[in-house]
Amino acid sequence: MKKLIFTLALIMQTALLFASNDKKIVAQARQDNVKMYQQPGTCTHILKSLSTQDKIEIVRKYNENWTIVVVDGQVGYVLHSEIGKPAKNLEIKTLASAKTSRK
């Protein structure tokens, strides 16, 4: 019985993990020269230096200081304080709008 409950709980967690959220939150850097790091720490490798023109896709909050982001297909960490609010003029894509229709 315990194995059955454990297996069901594991299946539910896996299903929730792979459930996709169609909406993507896109934001901007508050200023130019914002660093995107490989790991959540300022002593780690810098992947990119972001400008206010870059579209930053927010994946999720990592902890109280860091956010996991995607910029140009590259995943990294940016400090919360360096990310501005989502801009109204930036395009927010959904998976449904990104798919092409087949005929």
Image: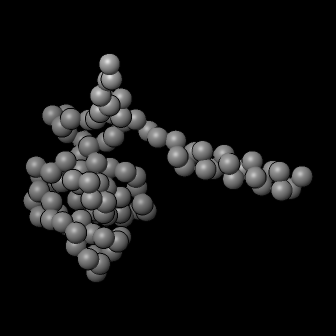
Q: Residue extending furthest bottom? A: 43
Q: Residue at x 26, y 77 (%)?
A: 45
- Left or right: 14 as drawn, with respect to 34: right
Left or right? Give the position of 12 relative to 55: right
Front one among 93 and 85? 93
- Give residue 35's quadrant in the image: bottom left
Q: Splitting the image into 4 quarters, where does residue 67 fall? A: bottom left
Residue 33 screen position, x and y as percent: 11, 64
Q: Is residue 11 visible?
A: yes
Query: Looking at the figure, which quarter contains the C terminus?
Result: top left
Residue drawn 63% across the image and 50% down it: 13
Up the image or down, 92 lies above or below 61; here it is above
Residue 75, percent across and down?
31, 60
Query: Is residue 41 positioned above or below 27 on the image?
Result: below
Q: In this rendered view, identify the residue nearer to me: 89 or 19.
A: 19
Q: Residue at x 29, y 78 (%)?
A: 44
Residue at image position (72%, 50%) is 9
Q: Position of residue 54 (x, y in %)?
A: 15, 51
Q: Residue furthest right?
A: 1
